[in-house]
Amino acid sequence: MSETYRVTPQPHSPVTPAAGPVPDPRYAAWLAHALDLARAAGQAGEVPVGAVVLDRDGGVVGVGANAREESGDPTAHAEILALRAAARHTGSWRLPESTLVVTLEPCVMCAGAIVAARVRTLVIGAWDPKAGACGSVWDLVRDTRANHWVEVVGALDEEGCGEVLRAFFRERRA
């Protein structure tokens, strides 16, 4: 687990992180669960990203892993699938007390879904400097023009989550 983390209530640049309190010690276990989902997705030929949605007490209410290749669905990102599962589990599309833990910073589509679902906290394993929409390239989840803002805990395990992705693409390009 990386020693570098940040909790930011407002937009920032990952290059200059904002200081914040020590994150919930349970984040490491939840991120490990998401990484297991990511690895399984990678073994199935999907880009290895995993996501876990937790209720306010830390109980798992939804999980997801990338499934675009298997499903042929361009929206089958880990975050979307986890949010759908959580909505089914709770019986509501509103998830205001939830935490979403994901191995890679969400894209624009997933950031929009996170805001729409009213997720309270987003825990990111690694930043996505090419397409991230929660603090690196864009910061849609904390845009003050939106109707909801998300607390972001970022780069909890940049090295571990990043290596899962790098290994996947190394193998594909070999």
Image: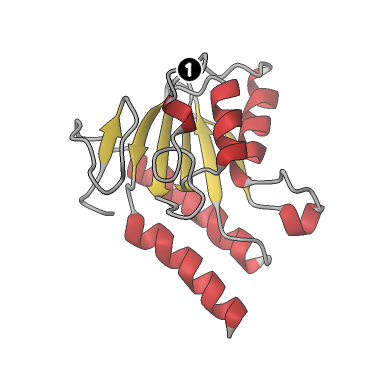
Looking at the picture, tell me which residue is in the foreground, 63 or 16: 16
Q: Residues within 10 Å of mark 1 (few under 14, many from 20)?
A: few
Residue 105 vertical placement versus 22 (above, below): below
Q: Residue at x 32, y 26 (%)?
A: 10
Could you tell whether 147 is left or right of 137 in the image? right
Q: Quadrant of the N terminus?
A: bottom left
Q: Quadrant of the C terminus?
A: bottom right
The answer, for residue 24, to whether it is visible in the render is no
Residue 118 vertical placement versus 48 (above, below): above
Q: Residue at x 72, y 43 (%)?
A: 75
The answer, for residue 150, to whether it is visible in the render is yes
Determine whether the residue tagged by mark 1 lies in a helix, strand or loop.
loop
Looking at the picture, tell me which residue is in the foreground, 170 or 144: 144
Picture coordinates of residue 37 (x, y %)? 56, 53
Q: Which residue is mark 1?
A: 145
Identify the amino acid type marked 1: Arg
Q: Residue at x 24, y 41 (%)?
A: 17
Looking at the picture, tell me which residue is in the foreground, 85 or 49: 49
